[in-house]
Amino acid sequence: MQKRILQLSLCLIITILVLVSSTIRAETENNNWQWQVAPYLWLSDLDIDFQSDSPPIGGGPSFFDDILSKLDMVFEIQAEANIRDNGLLLDFMYFDFSDDVRYDLVQIDTTTRLTAWLVDFAGYQRFQQSSSYFDIFAGLRWVKLRMTFDFERTTPPIFENQLKVTESFMDLLVGARYHYELNQHWAAKARLDFSKGETEGIWDARIEADYKISQKRNDRIFFGYRARHIEADLGGVLLELDMHGPYVGYNFIF
């Protein structure tokens, strides 16, 4: 039943994206396209917890908290195209983290490596006023997670093993964002989105300020704070991932 609902919802989202694309194509003759490409760096604090139903540690489920807790850099790039009050946006993120953790109480040493790819694709409708605008967007979020978890007990009974899982997911994505021009150079922004489908749920929130370089160029430098939470079932491994921290980037507008 859940799979059927997801399939129908995917068809609905694809239909919305096609309609938005058609509207954009119909207006290309007005030559009012605006394009944006924004690479940025996210200094993210990463925390991972997971529960596994079948690791060889005792006879029941095993829980591991903060198996990877690390401050590291994440590279991401966003692209956007819009005409008037309609647009399309694409967001790509990749990271590869690894860390070692020792659980002194049970004398277990762990090494965790997590690699992730996340791609958001959505269409949006804009509601604009003189100094601000509000966007509502909907689309798809594709996620691929690969985790390797090595654990070793250093006191009797001594054992070691490895848990390795890779899964891909497709979610429905909905969200909203708000932009307010403070003056000729400064603007404030906020964005909130949520996706669910094949994952257990992903939410993302960010607040941002940006600075317009000059009156002759629309390019902007931006910085802000962002938080993201991911829950996913990787074939019997329930993974919870939290990311939060400041980011900075440059928005090329043309």
Image (spheres, grey):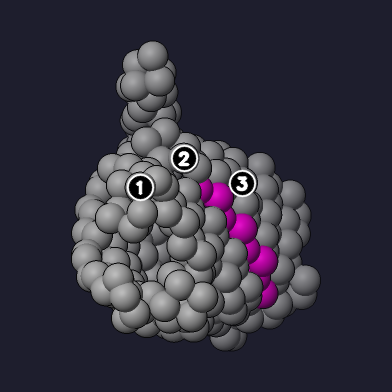
| Element on which disc 2 rests | loop
Q: Is residue 8 visible?
A: no
Q: Residue furthest front?
A: 156
| Element on which disc 3 rests | strand
Quadrant of residue 92 in the image? bottom left
- Between 207 and 202, which is closer to the camera in this rendering? 202
Work out how far the residue at label 1 is from the one at label 2, CA to CA, in angstroms: 26 Å
Magenta residues, dominant SS class: strand
Q: Nearer the viewer, mark 3 or mark 2?
A: 2
Residue at numbered disc 1: 59
Q: Is residue 149 visible?
A: yes
Kindly identify the amino acid type of the residue bearing the numbered disc 2: Glu
| Element on which disc 1 rests | loop
User: What span is colored magenta in the figure?
Assistant: 202-209
- Identify the mark nearer the N-term, 1 or 3: 1
Quadrant of residue 39 in the image? bottom left
217, above or below 57, in the image: below
Relative to residue 153, is residue 84 drawn left or right?
Answer: right
Residue 176: x percent and y percent? 61, 46
Q: Which mark is residue 176?
A: 3
Kindly identify the amino acid type of the residue bearing the numbered disc 1: Gly
- Identify the mark nearer the N-term, 3 or 2: 3
Kindly identify the amino acid type of the residue bearing the numbered disc 3: Ala
Relative to residue 238, is residue 126 drawn left or right?
Answer: right
Q: Is residue 203 magenta?
A: yes
